[in-house]
Amino acid sequence: MENILQGLNASQLEAVTSTEGFIRVIAGAGSGKTRALARRFAYLVNEIGILPGNILCVTFTNKSANEMRQRIHNLTGDNDTGYISTFHSFCVSVLQEDSHALQYPKSFLVLDNSDIDSMLKIIYEERGLTLRNMTFSKARDMIEIRKLIKEPKYYLDMLNMSLDTLRQKYLTATEPSDIIFYGYLYQEKKCFGLDYNDLIKFTLYIFEQNEAVKIKWQQRLEYIMIDEFQDIDELQYKLMSVLCGYHKNLFIVGDPDQTIYTWRGANVRYLLDFDKIFPSVKTIMMMQNYRSTPQIVSVVNDLIDKNKFRIKKNLMPTIADGMKVICHHADTSEREAMWIAEQIQALHGEGTSYREITVLYRAHYITRIVEEVFLREKIPYAIYSGVQFFNRMEIKDALAYLRLIAYKDDLAFLRVVNVPKRNLGERRIKFLQEYAVKHQCSLYISLETNLDNEIFKGTKAAQFVALIENFAANYAERQISELLAAILNESGYEKMLRTEGSQERLDNLAELKQSVYEYETSCGEESTLEHYLSHIALFTNSDAADNSDKVKLMTVHSAKGLEFPYVFLCAMNEGVFPSKKTDTIQKMEEERRLAFVAMTRAQKGLYLSEAEGRNFDGSPRYPSRFLLDIEPALLDYTQKPQEGLIRETKDYLVINERYLADEENQSSLAVGQRVKHSIFGSGTVVDVDLIKAAHLVKFDNIDTPRSISFRAKLEKD
Ligand code: ATP
Ligand code: MG
């Protein structure tokens, strides 16, 4: 067992040994907040004799909860590690013990977004709603908002009404939002499901309704500790306030510079105003950084200093000098990825293992090119967040369409025959399967042969077959990139994503098109569709993430709280990082904090890179302002962008910052909104481009979408 108080500085010691009352630690990245939290847990158990089961320790992710449990197990040698969990999973523990207080079964089902979507699908089909009435993402938001604000007592209905009554309410509702809301409550009750918001709300509600249960938990939790407190939201805050109400021992740690979830409702004020809300708060500050080299520390200090809405503080390095932070400008994204691969191989050659290296990025789609190069260069890697590029739903769907053109195979057929909806549901597929078995043909042939059968009346089966036949007739003469773009358009697949408001999926498809285009230009003569499909099949067989010696790939958000010896932060370009959705100064500051979180993960080596080229919409790519924020002398440039590009970037930034500050220029239209233009007539907003400050609108009478500046006010139709 390690000595609990060894290797702590004076402030950490104070944090660990101040066990009673309200304690707040405000401290910088890598200053040992999480270490202090873990040691404090061990101190309570080993030195004071508190039972682990009477301590609640809240972490931000399940991954960090596991790490914390391991740390505490090492410190206390105890297998009972108490409640070390996220707010959500702690609530699951409460509900599993006490949901019967509300007559809800303990074996409830926790619902995630895809479960919610499946329920929405049923509701939309049953009640004849379409995505025009409301996109799924809007419907999810609407349900959430209604539960939180408009009908905070919604669960009274859900609990007290019988399943039948709830169904009646759903079937007799007339407004789409009522239909969806009550349909959802009905579906939830039917499977005894609870979504993420319910977990905390239900727990709070039980505490409110049942004094005995509340007091039981309040008495049980003698000490409460919370990590990453800068990203706490209102519900979590309420829960925490209730839980600490009896013993009044609450210990929180956070760093205002690392607030990165305000888009999801987090509010840093809970951290900053903590002393105004709770009595006799003791505040402990820690500014020494124990994680990164002085070279990295000065770079991150310089970056975060550019935020205006911030309490000034500087991290102070404590560990020995290391190498300078390296910065690389590449001509293309592919060259950027190749440079990263080279650097990694060089590190590996010097004895660094792959698992010590992590590649961080702002958005998932960035991984595609990095993955391709790593596969080619035989660098083992594992993706630690999201799904691997070629395993993503929209990529698989798009490839299934291409496969149908060339092969008409059953798997591809089943994957997309009813995506978008063509009214070819289970019953009809079953019919096709039976026919196919009997006549020993493919499902596609079976459909083609039976188009005139009664069973396909009222479906879009004929259109589907016509679509595929049309493409199959001449695909060998067409470019693959052109085929892909055309089929995604003509099948209605992209339109479906647009109406669902799935921007991330559309971005991934744009990235796929780019990869096909690159494949064509690099293969020349050989670039047949069949060749491409077999080439791409290699990518889909990648194995799942594990702990063996591999480079880690993850988004910045999921790297929160973690540290890695070597960090590559790639695609540091305007429109990627900061994201193109950044339309206010506040959001820009959050992006900068996110960049700060990314860079402060590095211990020994930090590599920043970006690439020239074009964005999906054709606009030129500029280096990220976050690179320009850093004093050039602090960076070791392997290759600098040309003077001309820097000048253009600066010009662009001046315009963009003026735009951020100007409320007039904000868009008030969402994707999917029907609009009217004085000349072009009616249309639908298909994209909002904050960099160009324009709406991309598909007008009903014009074939291709047009960019219309925010200044030209479009009327809602
Ligand atoms: P973040 O803000 O990124 O969550 P943090 O403040 O939680 O960072 P920790 O992860 O606890 O920081 O610590 C950063 C690194 O510094 C860890 O490797 C930790 O073991 C080490 N460390 C913390 N305190 C000390 C100390 N007093 N002496 C030596 N090393 C320390
Ligand atoms: Mg931490």
Image: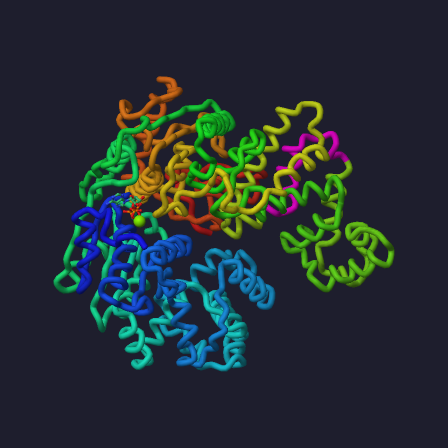
> In the displayed structure, would residue 328 be above or below residue 689?
above
Asked whether 166 or 291 is in front, the reply is: 291
Asked whether 177 or 563 is in front, the reply is: 563
Is there any visible trace of residue 686 in the rendered image?
no
Give the residue furthest to the top.
Answer: 643
Residue 596 falls within the magenta-colored stretch: no
Give the residue furthest to the front.
Answer: 1
Q: Position of residue 156 (x, y in %)?
A: 40, 78
Q: Position of residue 497 (x, y in %)?
A: 55, 49
Task: Name the quadrant containing residue 403.
Answer: top right
Asked whether 267 or 137 is in front, the reply is: 267
| Residue range (magenta) | 474-494
> In the displayed structure, would residue 614 be above or below residue 668?
above
Q: In the displayed structure, does residue 117 sit left or right of residue 330?
A: right
Q: Give the position of the N terminus as an image quadrant.
A: bottom left
The residue sitting at 51% across, 57% down in the picture is 136
> In the displayed structure, would residue 311 be above or below residue 241?
above
Q: In the displayed structure, does residue 497 sit left or right of residue 54?
A: right
Q: Position of residue 365 (x, y in %)?
A: 50, 40
The residue sitting at 62% across, 29% down in the picture is 519
* Displayed-image quarter of ligand 1: top left
